[in-house]
Image (tube, coloured by chain):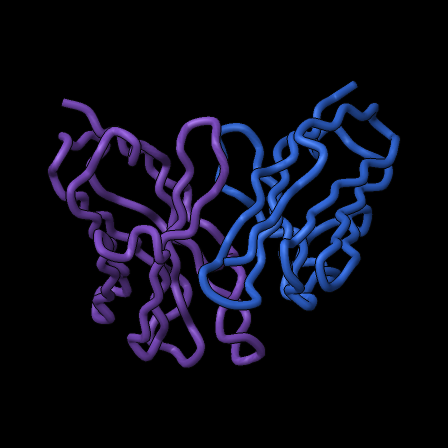
Amino acid sequence: QITLEVSGPTLVKPTQNLTLTCTVSGVSISATAEGVGWIRQPPGKALEWLALIYWDDDKRYSPSLKSRLTISKNTSKNQVVLTMTNMDPVDTATYYCARRRGGFSVTTGWFDPWGQGTLVTVSS
Amino acid sequence: EIFLTQSPATLSVSPGERATLSCRASQSVSSHLAWYQQKSGQAPRLLIYGASTRAAGVPARFSGSGSGTEFTLTISGLQSEDFGVYYCQRYYDWPLTFGQGTRLEIK
């Protein structure tokens, strides 16, 4: 069974940086064709894709947030880390990580399964 | 950037009936479309990928169709556990995008 668990702060102040960790179990994130993505969801709103990292360290970012995001992985811990700089109250959302699927049939992919997500509130 | 528009925003259907949800892309995405179900307080769950392939463990009452710019998720014989919000996601190219969701409510 493959599971993903998000950990990190639930409250950050405006202008601070946010660092979230996604711990993956049941599959190695360095295995060929594997990838992990981050998606967020403001309260009551739709899903928004943020970033994705592949097994070979290829990284992709949402163009609208690219300047503020960094995605990385720690293969020894089977973890993927997302850092978002200069947090603002509009960044208040539930942040999810999810396993990228699609193998080599597509260069992008869909997500399955998803971690439970963590609500991050940006407030002073 | 390719945008996805889901309709209707809210759909009220009685248990046992059929629900038809629509997702329209602003440009062709071929068959590179997925559907997710999200229940209140839970993470999304993959239902369909490749526009019409059911994910593992997804009941046969869920079916996806379409290609290009028009896609449909059909749920036949609605059950109480099927109510929630449904999102489509395109993965034809970057950036990955989701629709704004359709809320499926009990009538």
Q: Residue furthest top?
A: B107
Q: Nearer the viewer, residue A105 or A45?
A: A45
Q: Nearer the viewer, residue A86 or A43?
A: A86
Q: Residue at x 37, y 36 (%)?
A: A94
Q: Position of residue B107 (x, y in %)?
A: 79, 18
Q: Position of residue B18 (x, y in %)?
A: 86, 36
Q: Position of residue A103 (x, y in %)?
A: 52, 76
From the viewer's perspective, tell me whether residue A41 is left or right of residue A92.
right
Name the image quarter holding residue B54.
bottom right
Q: Position of residue B65 (x, y in %)?
A: 79, 57
* Above or below: residue A114 compared with residue B83: below
Q: Residue at x 65, y 54 (%)?
A: B25
Q: Which chain is blue?
A: B
Q: Residue at x 69, y 47 (%)?
A: B23
* Above or below: residue A94 compared with residue B2: above
Q: Residue at x 54, y 28 (%)?
A: B40
User: Which quadrant of the rendered structure holds the C terminus of chain A?
Assistant: top left
Name the image quarter holding residue B70.
bottom right
Number of disc labels: 0
* Above or below: residue A124 compared with residue A115: above
From the viewer's perspective, tell me whether residue A116 is left or right of residue B88.
left
Name the image quarter holding residue B39.
top right
* Above or below: residue A80 compared with residue B81: below
Q: Which chain is purple?
A: A
